[in-house]
Amino acid sequence: MFSPVCYLREEDIMGNEPPLRIGYVPENFSTPIYFAKKHFGLSAELVAFPSGTGHMITALRAGDIDVGIGLTEGWVAGLGKEDVTGDGGYRLVGTYVETPLCWAISTGAKRPEITSVESLKGGKIGVSRIGSGSYVMGFVLADKHGWLSPDSDSSPYSDTVVLNTFEHLRGAVNSGEADFFMWEHFTSKRYYDSGEIRRVGEIYTPWSSWKIVASTALVGESAPDPRVADLFDKLDRGIRYFKENKEEAVKYISTELDYSEEDAREWLKTVRFPEHTAGVDGAVVKDTVQVLRKAGVLVEGKGLEPGAMIAKTR
């Protein structure tokens, strides 16, 4: 398995510029990034964020990373919130995954009082961070089931418990610190199979699930940083290799990441990466904002408008 932080040189293309610092989530979806680095010389420091998109937003705004590859709803919520300051710190520049994400809804193995999704109304939701995908989807779930009060700004849950990592989320639903949490289906499945946690239901994102963002320092008023274009080129090559070498992908996912071979193969049937990662479909961002406003995550007239969130359109 590659180190969470990797240094690769490509001075002949990038001149004396340092490698981009790229934040990513070390899960099954990261496999084409690994292939881009291994087979096509992606020049980057790859920085793992197991706590997800919300943590990458903090790192981008602090100047700790230059690029992030994470969940659409997290990126859009981060720029659309009413308390966003300055220029927001980043912009959407690329599309990494075309298919929606299946969020599995999980509770503790010995929580007999939780029998269905409806049992979760008014309960304690565990999230990785405020603003993360697991946090945002809690509101989308509440909206879908009619738990939101149109006359109140209060949360549909009795408590929102910030737990940072998937491991801590699993522990919290077993200890009772949280009643449930949401995480990607195949990442969760191994722990259903082992009996550590129990599946209650699922919800799909109504948008394509992963986007690429870059710091506003890289995509501001001046010409875009050439390292970003090189990133798109190497990711495109990594994705093509992923599509053409499924057995190598299965081996990597099942030996270096936390998945069984069977689950790796099943996941491959469900995911679709784009042919070209550069650019974002403005309609997807607009639709995401509309859903998040309806769910109460964003407020119309506050934060950035959808078009302003995008630095590069398709």
Image: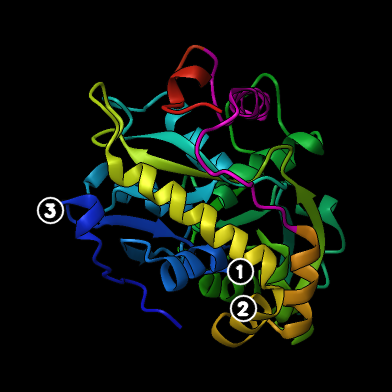
Dot in front, 1 or 3: 3
Outermost residue, right side: 115
Q: Nearer the viewer, residue 59 or 150?
A: 59
Q: Residue at x 28, y 68 (%)?
A: 8
In this figure, which residue is indicated by the disc labeled 2? 253
- In this view of the protein, can residue 198 be seen by the observer? yes
The amino acid marked with disc number 3 is Asn
Q: Nearer the viewer, residue 79 or 245?
A: 245
Q: Going by the image, does 219 lie left or right of 310?
A: left
- In this view of the protein, can residue 181 be seen by the observer? no
Q: Secondary structure at mark 3?
A: loop
Q: Residue at x 62, y 54 (%)?
A: 125
Q: Residue at x 61, y 69 (%)?
A: 28
In this figure, which residue is indicated by the disc labeled 1? 28
Answer above or below: position of 7 versus 73.
below
Of labels 1 and 3, earlier in sequence is 3
Cα gap from disc 1 to disc 3, whole angstroms: 33 Å
Magenta stretch in the rendered image: 271-300
The amino acid marked with disc number 2 is Ile
Q: Position of residue 6 (x, y in %)?
A: 31, 72
Answer above or below: position of 217 versus 10.
above
Is 115 included in the stretch rendered in magenta?
no
Q: Going by the image, does 178 lie left or right of 43?
A: right
In this figure, which residue is indicated by the disc labeled 3? 16
Of labels 1 and 2, earlier in sequence is 1
Of labels 2 and 3, earlier in sequence is 3
Answer above or below: position of 136 versus 151.
below
Q: Residues within 10 Å of mark 1 (few under 14, many from 20)?
A: many
Q: Position of residue 94 (x, y in %)?
A: 50, 39
Residue 215 sits in quarter: top left
- The answer to the question of whether label 1 and label 2 lie on touching residues, with beta carbons closer than 8 A, is yes
Outermost residue, left side: 16
